[in-house]
Amino acid sequence: MTVRDHMMVAHSLRGEVFGPARALHGATYVVDATFRGEALDDDGILVDIGRAAEVLHSVVADLGYRNLDDDERFAGRNTTTEVLARYVADRLAERVAAGELGTDGVRGVAVTLRESPVASATYERAV
Amino acid sequence: MTVRDHMMVAHSLRGEVFGPARALHGATYVVDATFRGEALDDDGILVDIGRAAEVLHSVVADLGYRNLDDDERFAGRNTTTEVLARYVADRLAERVAAGELGTDGVRGVAVTLRESPVASATYERAV
Amino acid sequence: MTVRDHMMVAHSLRGEVFGPARALHGATYVVDATFRGEALDDDGILVDIGRAAEVLHSVVADLGYRNLDDDERFAGRNTTTEVLARYVADRLAERVAAGELGTDGVRGVAVTLRESPVASATYERAV
Amino acid sequence: MTVRDHMMVAHSLRGEVFGPARALHGATYVVDATFRGEALDDDGILVDIGRAAEVLHSVVADLGYRNLDDDERFAGRNTTTEVLARYVADRLAERVAAGELGTDGVRGVAVTLRESPVASATYERAV
Amino acid sequence: MTVRDHMMVAHSLRGEVFGPARALHGATYVVDATFRGEALDDDGILVDIGRAAEVLHSVVADLGYRNLDDDERFAGRNTTTEVLARYVADRLAERVAAGELGTDGVRGVAVTLRESPVASATYERAV
Amino acid sequence: MTVRDHMMVAHSLRGEVFGPARALHGATYVVDATFRGEALDDDGILVDIGRAAEVLHSVVADLGYRNLDDDERFAGRNTTTEVLARYVADRLAERVAAGELGTDGVRGVAVTLRESPVASATYERAV
């Protein structure tokens, strides 16, 4: 089951490889969060779409409308698309483990962040 | 190899978790069917796109323009996006096993149903 | 300025021309609402995106998760994509005229409803 | 004729109406530039797609990978989606007038900036 | 009201301006056909979506799976995206005028051909 | 990490199964290339998006604006979507192995070619 949200952030990247992206710029990240499992519950669902969307929104809202260069959660690290995908996936896995999705059927999460029509990054992990 | 079709259905969902979706409403499901295999045949294909599209269309047409609450195939079960994705995948697997795709190279099928720009469900299975 | 939302409804259509759509079925309508004007205000906007999204959402939420065949607002009329686009556009025009968008620069509205990847309808009107 | 490009910028917006967007954040703008005319030339084109794409890219590249709050071109003004759409359209109109598109058939330009899957702004003008 | 179809053709373009597109190559054109009018009929439609889709498909099928360089309809002319959009629009206007859409409410047609994610052409005309 | 490009080619397919696609026609292939790995480097990336895009573009440019029926690389073979996806994936795997992506973290590549809104093929392999 996959739900979508988005966030708008400012940041810059440190390292010669990044070229023009070393300057302070920004991105709209379209965020797809996938919850995987092996069986459906008695209601016929893996997770409720509405609840999954709320949990994703709370994680995404905690990143959006910020300059990530000033965010202590990423101190000393580049906030690349890959790093942000992993961050969102890790927060979702915590929420699943805490029972916030109201199900015990989720075995894994995958998060894709699309930064433009031509580039995206996905991070997958177990729960 | 993936082919796309769509279907338009009415239904309601039983269970407190579904909130407003407990009322009779409807959905356009955009259906992506993926056929997986390990090798291509002498024509350079896993399955013919045209034949795959026809088989998917016949499965989808058998669900569309209906009120699924009155459909005996789903009696006593919720027709959630997950359940419908599994139903389509199971029918496609039967068609593959019956040789209707004109190939013996398909090892698995995956079906994704997109119910809105922000929610979808995928079901994967072996053939 | 254009904002997007969506709604999921059940309905049927009366008339020989509609073929299988005469049966009770449903649709996810992706709704794009465009507000047109000739000048931007001192903040550099025609309308605030957040406020426009809220107004659109309230109009769309008033239609969604329903069987439109039982809706008094459409008694005796087909709820075709064209009719629903006009209904949404008329409600938005009322909201604009009532000052709910917090601007007096809007001169017209246009509403597009996409019912599937291959079909949509647009209704345009002055405000 | 329409060509597409994109740009990634940081900025903040001044004014109570903008809520969380008053903080420094960012956006990926997907930019569609449309060139309008009444007749095709002897080659069967209004403008060459390749040349149109190059001109759009040079305008967009001049905005991307920047913090627009520090950009003199927008000093004292909000860089809303509407303002940026107008800025890009004005630059394209200058390029058309200067003959850089290699045609004299263009009568108008329209620029759409999509800032997220749910919001965009369009600015149209004559050339 | 807008319906979508697609076609796959081979062609080459004559003229220095076209660069690499002077070689024989090909394109998938995603074709959007819009029918415009001022009023809906008693069924609540401008044109029936199903009939509009059939008419568009017959026009598009008459172009697809061909090498347009060998097509007498375009002898001596480049089959640019603009030219093909006009050709499809002209054929649709003829069909409307011949009553094949089963309505007398259509006042104009517009056809958009998308040749790639970054380029498209639209042709509009009265009926 | 996934980057997108596209190419426009002419070709025909040999074999009864292909029906109308046996005639010379063409396609725009939208190409998504995914690079997979298990860990990020010290910069916080698997591969640099810019470099990945350049490598993909050079592979795709080597196929585009051609009639693949005359291309020696595919002599005696059908250039189906599946075959082309495998060809692009094999070339990308060679580039990864040659160190051209400036990283040793890539373990696999997957290439998806979309030939139309309703059909695509994906080829995955290790590096």
Image (cartoon, coloured by chain):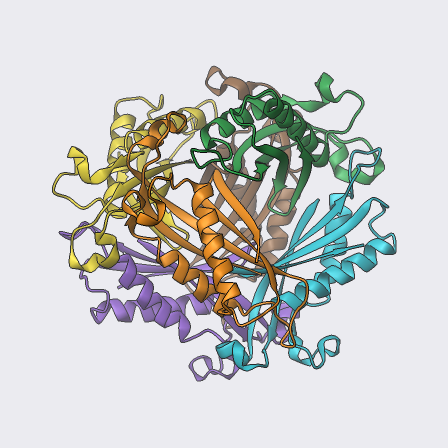
Chain colours: A brown, B purple, C cyan, D green, E orange, F yellow
Q: Is residue B70 above or below residue B110?
A: below
Q: In the rendered image, which quarter is residue F58 located in?
A: top left
Q: In the rendered image, which quarter is residue E60 located in?
A: bottom left
Q: Residue furthest top?
A: A16
> In this view of the protein, which residue sits in the foreground, F82 or E60?
E60
Residue found 71% across the figure and 36% down from its top: D82
Q: Is residue C80 above or below residue A118?
A: below
Report the number of numbered marks: 0
> In this view of the protein, which residue sits in the foreground, A117 or A40?
A117
> In this view of the protein, which residue sits in the foreground, C20 or E107?
E107
**Residue B47 horizontal side relative to residue C13, left or right:** left
Residue found 52% across the figure and 64% down from its top: E96
Residue found 25% across the figure and 57% down from its top: F20
> In this view of the protein, which residue sits in the foreground, E114 or A69?
E114
Whole-percent x, y for residue B35 in the image: 30, 57
Whole-percent x, y for residue E64 in the image: 33, 53
Whole-percent x, y for residue E72 in the image: 31, 48
**Residue F32 horizontal side relative to residue C111, left or right:** left
Can see residue E28?
Answer: yes
Residue found 22% across the figure and 57% down from its top: F18
**Residue B109 horizontal side relative to residue C21, left or right:** left
Whole-percent x, y for residue F53 in the image: 40, 29
